[in-house]
Image (cartoon, rainbow, N blue to C red):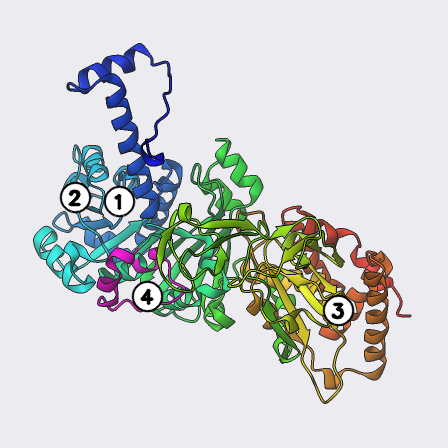
Amino acid sequence: MTKSLRSVQVSVNVPKTLLSRIEKSRKGLSRSDYIRQVLEESESYKAEKKLNGVVYTPQNLAEYVSHKVLSYFFLNQKNIKRLGSQSKKLRVIDPACGDGELLLAISNASFPVDGFLKSEQLELYGLDIDKKSLLQTQKRLTEYHTFTPIHTNALCPFKSEHDIGWLNLKKRHCGFDSFDIVIANPPWGADVSDYYNLLSDGNFSLLNRQFDSSDLFIESALKNLEDGGFIAFIIPDSLFSQERESLRGYLLSKTKIHFIGRFGEKIFKDVNRACAVVICEKGKANDQHKIDCFRLSVEHRNLILAGSTDFHSAELELSHKVEQSRFENNKNYLFNIDIDAELEATYNKILGQLDTLENHLNSSRGVELSKKGNVIQCVNCKKWSPSPSKETFKCSHCKSSMTTLECQKDIIIHKQVIKNSRPLIVGEHISRYSLRSDLWIDISKDGIKYKNCDLYESNKLVVRKTGIGISASIDYLQRMTNQVVYIFKLKEKKTKSFPLEFFLALINSRLAFFLIAMSNGEIEWKSHPYITQKQILDFPVPDIEKIPTAMFEEILSISSEIKESLKQGELISETLDARCEKLIAALYGLNKKDYKSIFIAIEKSQELLSVKALKNIKIEDIFNTKAV
């Protein structure tokens, strides 16, 4: 018997009620064959949902989002007057309706319109590629409301490019051109390869290198929305990351944003991915327009999950307003919603520097391999590559297809010295002003991207890519690094330059934590937090030519002491840490009041190791310490 056909016998106890249902449904199949068939269908269905980025919306979140979008919609008196006439319809669509939770929440909501007849005036439309889910939604909604289920893909309806497909869809199912509200929890990270060519023909401006499938649903929604209509979308938390500039810029240019909520992880059961909510009105915002911004804290999220409070109550306590123009003027259109009026002055002082780290440091990354060190050899070209995640794969070198079962495998990262090896630094080896290394990597495998040896020579500042906050140190021993470690080296300059140790002090400072954490909002644990090289290189720094001589001498003195501590394998002292922070505060023109803002941000952050390390000194320690 081949490996693929080999089976294992499993014994399981079945309740009598379930056994009775099995007996009625198995239609001539043996019990074991029927149960196996059901399991195979179930697993196949789950795999398909995962591939398509499908996660159904929890009831409490659906009710909250539907209430929010309706409350904004009815702030406009024109909408109240229009729907007060019973001949007018409110047309709501969910382009990825799944089990219909969001549409059900809309249908159950109260409407602040005298004489509004839900049963006659509320028209609900739902699209989905899953016929089973559509049937379930239809059962939930059609008893009291007008609901039109449409079995197709909203991004390319009826296997046509977007605009043509939607034109046909609206002619066939709707009889009108645009909707009043589009509400959705669209697929996140869906595999669109099967219909990518149709998307390319669909004039999606967000179909770029950094897009998520949910972005395209937003663009589609705005194309099919009435002017002054609203979208309410539950989307990935990556909305706030630096590289999602295109999506933020698109929303800012096309809509008046009314609400941005950041909800973190665990809102969706068994899904370790943080979520956000955006509610926008189609149309241009004026300079005075303000957005309701709301980050759900860890404490409030736990209370919601325990059923002790709800999203509305948490919002009342935690929300604040930000002018949309601020986001429009931010570099990369950052949605830095954690910066409220109390923190904004300090944030802007730091951003006010005219120079950046990019003018002082070169950046790169190490070996393209995870710390597990699993590699595989191509059966054709005999070159090695990192082990693939799927059983069937293409060789990254010769592009031939094969399965992992055919290939020779090896592990090239070890906890002891081996032949042809060099010491290796991985992310977990780096913490604030500390660096260890207990791994060695075999450098003899042809095909592995070890990078040029020159990269690892000379002193280098190393920063851990993953984790909350910043963890950085300096390697003086020419060790190799892997892909989750950023390497920074001094650029060659003809004029005077800062020592590498000063840049380490800057990157490890509380000031740097404040700016980066408040820019991208990474202040709590999540499954895949990371900092980018661009965030570090974009960090603003003072003009070195304008620094007074006495201050530059203090920079050299501090840098020398940091170097001595690191070379001896010691953490820097609290006194030296305070001196570093005081010097950096002076360089940026920050005072005690500014540092109160910085420490507020630190206190808001979840108490992880990288954050705890910033609490070892107080504001008084910083401003009372003396330069040596």
Location of residue 572 with respect to 148 vertically, above or below: below
Q: Give how far across and how far down residue 134 sits, in percent.
A: 20, 40
**Among the two numbered marks 4 and 2 on one chain, the one whose residue lies closer to the N terminus:** 2
Could you say where residue 386 lies in the image, as x and y percent from the top left? Answer: 50, 55
Who's the residue at 57% across and 67% down the image? 533
Q: Give the percent coordinates (x, y) of residue 74.
A: 30, 52
Q: Is residue 529 above or below residue 335?
A: above
Q: Is residue 340 visible?
A: no
- The first of marks 2 and 3 along the sequence is 2
The answer to whether residue 547 shows anywhere in this view is yes
List the residue tagged with mark 3: 585
Q: Secondary structure at mark 3?
A: helix
Q: Residue at x 39, y 64 (%)?
A: 398
- Residue type highlighted by circle 2: Pro
Q: Is residue 57 left or right of residue 330?
A: left
Determine whether the residue tagged by mark 4 lies in a helix, strand or loop: loop
Task: Report the quarter where the C terminus lies.
Answer: bottom right
Pick whichever of labels 4 and 1 is earlier in the sequence.
1
Which disc is residue 149 wearing?
Answer: 2
Task: Say which label, 2 or 1, has the lower sequence index.
Answer: 1
Report, in whole angstroms, how far the alpha carbon at label 4 lies from the one at label 1: 22 Å
Residue type at mark 3 is Ala
For the residues labelled 1 and 3, the Cα–Cα distance comes to 51 Å
Task: Find out whether the residues at labels 4 and 1 contact each other: C-beta distance under 8 Å.
Answer: no
Q: Comparing marks 4 and 2, which lies closer to the viewer? A: 4
In the picture of the structure, the residue carrying the numbered disc 4 is: 207
Residues marked 2 and 3 touching at CB (< 8 Å): no
